[in-house]
Image (cartoon, coloured by chain):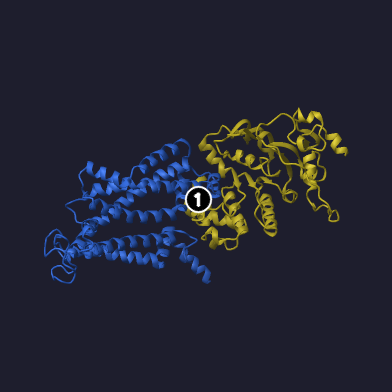
Amino acid sequence: MTGILSIKNLVVDFKLRAGNTRALNQVSLELMNGEILGIVGESGCGKSMTALSIMGLIPSPPGKITGGSIIFDGEELLTASKTRMRQIRGGIISMIFQQSMTSLNPVLRIGDQIAECVLLHEEVTKVEAWARAVETLTMVGIPEPEIRAWGYPHELSVGMRQRVMIAMALSCRPRVLIVDEPTAALDVTVQAQIFDLLKDLQRETGIAIIMTTHDMGAIAELADRVAVLYAGHIIETGSTRDILTNPQHPYTRGLISCVPYLGENPTEVRPYLTEIKGVMPSLTGFESGCAFAPRCPYKTPICEEVRPENEAVIGVHTAACHNLKYVAAV
Amino acid sequence: MAVVENTLIVRSQSPLREAMHAFRQSWTGMLGIVILALIVIFTYIGPILYPVDPFDIVWAPMTPPGVAAVAPLGTDYLGRNILAGLIHGGSATLYVGIVAGIITITIGVLIGALAGFCRGAVDEILMRLTEFFQVVPALLFAMVLVALFTPTIYVIAFAIGFVSWPATARMARAEVLRIRELEYVNAARVVGARNRKIIWQVILPNAFAPLIGSATLTIGTAMLFEAALSFLGLGDPNVFSWGLMIGEGREYIFDSWWAVTFSGLMIFLAVLGFSLVGDGLNNAFDPKLRER
């Protein structure tokens, strides 16, 4: 497996009246060809910011990428020209937003919206673009795609709209797909369908997918590899199995002990769930030290002074904690 | 097979033609079209069938309707034929209403959309400019403009359009500000659409409903505005208009109600016609309101 997208030491700052807010702090990620990378974390930890920085869509002002690099296939995206970025968006890297309810333009036909996207990126006639739209709709499992393409978004159910969104993102055959909370507003049956669809599409097209979520279930279902994000820091990465069965960082452990049942062993239903005490710290006036230290039950004096680096645990599994051995022993 | 046949019918239609089809289905829009058509026939065919100069004094002043055969709808305070006035005064009023309406909408939507979309310094500058226009009383401003130039019907139409765009601009800006934060604008950006495309194809079509409403209202107010200017003696003295009739008849409203009533009724009908058409267009262009 070779890397396709690599984020190195990405820093995103927001200049607000309250002060400088560091939304992402030294985030490094590596996306391999044809894998599904899950980014997990609670609200406001920087999941969407990571996704938006890859697309070059950080709301600016007030946001600004102040450091690091995002390299796609040897090409630096942070310094790419506007024209080049427009080609990349949709054409090479595509994104699906959380709200499928509001992500489609209500006054345009579904087929037109998808065809529009094809016309933006490829030298094709309108008829060809329309044919491609119907083809993509078929691919994402919309029944009667020729007829549906003539419909408007409000005529579709939420799950179908999510499928249309996926079709729109895939219409120009991108190489990377970013899925921002794919199942946030969907009910469980539809969630399962969308997961299956994404998995099938990934298998068929070999596209690399980055999925952000707060749902450990979604991670267990879909992701090959997981990065845990906390307050703008990557605190643990590893294969899905590593993270779910052998979490190292106290925060990841906390996250996993919040989930009632992970599907590995049906008898292992937890009667009592633990919680992570406290709330995520304000990102304004970032200090030195570990971001999780104020909430960490294993905190030692060094945690408040030195920011821990990501250290290898076993194989691809890394975690950023000073007291890994101590935490693992407890 | 019925479904497939149905799609073939739909396929043959462009979005515009589909909207027009929906428009023909809505009874409000069609009623508006009928009213406007009648008014247009009345004002453009009428003068041919009834070639009487509205400035001519034909009978005793303030004759009530139905008394003199030469002036079936009565005469005004100078003894001028009211029916001739209604027939000959329509084109000027409609002209002012439509031209001023188009100017208002064009300037208003351009400035509002630009301010709302660009935000930042552009927004600040354009909005301060809009506020400058808003704090000056519109009627007074229009009077100054008309007084500066010769009071022809063209200058009046231009002046009315030029002073009434700020409200439209503010509304267009508010709509654009609301829509630009919606997910589908981001979604359009994510597939690589450029700003121009986003403004024209994503934001403005979705702001269509309130804008068309405001456009039809603007045409109505422009007609009333023209009446106010005529009343103040700043109308085009060589052109007879419904506004002029109301303006001049107002002083004698208790002695000759017919002088203001009929021309007022015509303006009312014209404004109603435009509003109904606007309502019909609004429904026709919104896929959710469109009857299937």
In which image quadrant can residue A241 be found?
Answer: top right
Q: Nearer the viewer, residue A227 or A114?
A: A227
Q: Which of A306 and B287 is in front in this view?
A: A306
Query: How many C-alpha atoms fall within 10 Å of the one at disc 1: few (<14), some, or many (≥20)?
Result: many
Q: Which of B20 and B30 is in front in this view?
A: B30
Residue with the most extreme right position: A329
The residue located at (75%, 49%) in the rendering is A220
Question: Numbered disc 1: what chain?
Answer: A
Q: Name the residue under label 1.
A: A116
Inspect the image, locate mark 1, and give the three-letter code of the amino acid beneath it. Glu
Residue B52 locus on image (x, y percent): 14, 63
As drawn, A235 above or below B239: above
As drawn, B182 above or below A83: below
The answer to whether residue A300 is seen in the rendering is yes
Tint of chain A: yellow
Tint of chain B: blue
